[in-house]
Image: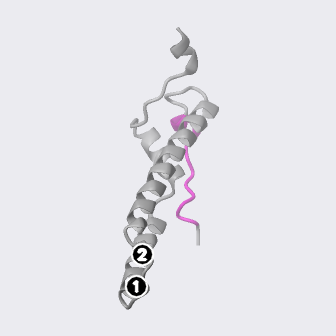
Amino acid sequence: MANPSITTRDTSELVKDTDNIYQTVVVASKRARQISSNVKEELSNKLAEFASTVDNLEEIFENREQIEISKFYERMPKPTIMAMEEFLEGKVYYRKREEEDK
């Protein structure tokens, strides 16, 4: 069975905006890092709600909720996939450094 997270991409589609496959990879990887950071922060904030120093019977229920939240985030698409989809849909804003200097 093929891995569903592996998708063959048409390189001409990837370079239509940048004219350079390496530039496309850089833009997508920077966006993936942003997405990853945001998701990690969001997950940490949700799990922090369950942090307690008291051991009691409610802890078992809280652990189930923590597990469900963690499973939800595990099932989410990987940041690299999300970033590449955003790039291909034209939702990623970027500019070249040379343009900033002018």
- The type of residue carrying mark 1 is Glu
Q: Amino acid at mark 2?
A: Ser
Could you tell whether 98 is left or right of 58 in the image? right
User: Looking at this rendering, what residue extends furthest in the top direction?
Assistant: 102
Q: Which residues are magenta?
A: 3-14
Q: Nearer the viewer, residue 20 or 10?
A: 20
Residue 66 x/y as whole percent: 42, 75
**Residue most toward the front?**
54
- State the CA–CA distance, disc 1 to disc 2: 9 Å
| Most common secondary structure along the magenta stretch | loop
| Quarter residue 76 falls in | bottom left
> Which of these two is toward me, 21 or 101?
101
Seen in the picture, residue 89 relative to 49 is either above or below; the reply is: above
Q: Residue at x 45, y 40 (%)?
A: 88
Q: Residue at x 50, y 52 (%)?
A: 79
Residue 89 placement: quadrant: top left
Let me know if residue 21 is in the magenta part. Answer: no
Name the residue beneath numbered marker 2.
Answer: 52
Percent of width and height locating residue 29: 57, 42
